[in-house]
Amino acid sequence: MRKYQPTLTPLVPTMYVGILEHPDLKKTSLKSFKIMTSGGSSLPVEVLNKFKELTGVNINEGFGMTETSPQTHLNPYKGVSKVGSIGIPYPDTDVRIVDIETGKKEVPAGEEGEMIFRGPQITKGYLNKPEETRKAIRNGWLYSGDIAYMDEDGYFFIVDRKKDLIISSGYNIYPREIDEVLYEHPKVLKAAAIGVPDPKRGEKIKVFVVLKDGMTATADEIMEYCRQKLGKYKWPSEIEFRTQLPESTVGKILRKELRAEELAKRTKK
């Protein structure tokens, strides 16, 4: 960055986390960037705000999927940008928020539901997988599997992945709510919450935490922090410290792998 003074970069959240922790950040100006975008997974608000504070550069958050070649939303360049929002749809891209139960009824602004798309960049289907295609694409609309809502200005906000939803004692709990709180902790570098089986509650919450270099913390310390910031039904039941979390090739934290590991451990027991 110091040598070539780039003006544009599309990154994923874990890369921004890495930049914030890099020892050379203090002697590196990022002012050459006209636009820095984030996608792949939700960018914690704490990371976005900290990045602006330390570098003076805004991160432009957007959204896309492999099936959308690759984007559907972006906060407008030099326009209104809303913290925590993925922005507005690209031209010629139709986006709706529909009820989670049937996927047929469009919900009003401010109400959460599944986000679906229609547009020229949307895939026609999965190669040689007609059943998966039928599930994902209905009447020309691609069902994203993401729970989101649209505000009164037409800006969209991702709540969480539909399949990541934790149902504990009848409560619907979105892992991202817990992640956001953990990212605010001064010792936490990365965090991920998942639901694990529980005979009484159906599921309970387990969080995985990676601490910043040189930091130490106890499970009790993290738990006490969560108690101060979260409603009781969102408190983690288990806290596990790790040196790293499973990530995709583009740095997206893979909750499904964490769930698979936990299920395998519990099955052995």
Image: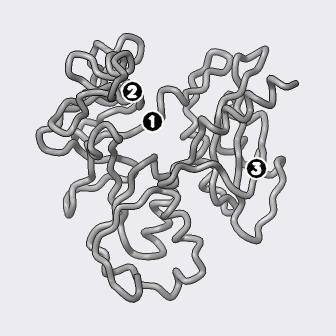
**What amino acid does circle 1 point to?**
Val
Looking at this rendering, what residue extends furthest in the right direction?
Answer: 269
- Residue 152 lies, in percent from the top left, at 24, 36
Spatial separation of the CA atoms under disc 1 and disc 2: 8 Å
Question: How far apart are labels 1 and 3 at the CA level?
Answer: 23 Å
Could you tell me the amino acid type at mark 2? Glu
Label 2 belongs to which residue?
A: 112
Tell me, yes or no, whether the two marked residues, 1 and 2, touch with CB atoms within 8 Å: yes
Report the residue at 66% width, 57% height from top.
185
Residue drawn at 61 percent across, 48 percent down: 181
- What residue did someone put label 1 on? 159
Q: Residues within 10 Å of mark 2 (few under 14, many from 20)?
A: some
Q: State which quadrant residue 126 falls in.
A: top left
Tell me the CA gap for discs 2 and 3.
29 Å
Q: Nearer the viewer, residue 245 or 29?
A: 245
Q: Residue at x 20, y 39 (%)?
A: 121
What's the residue type where badge 3 is placed? Ile
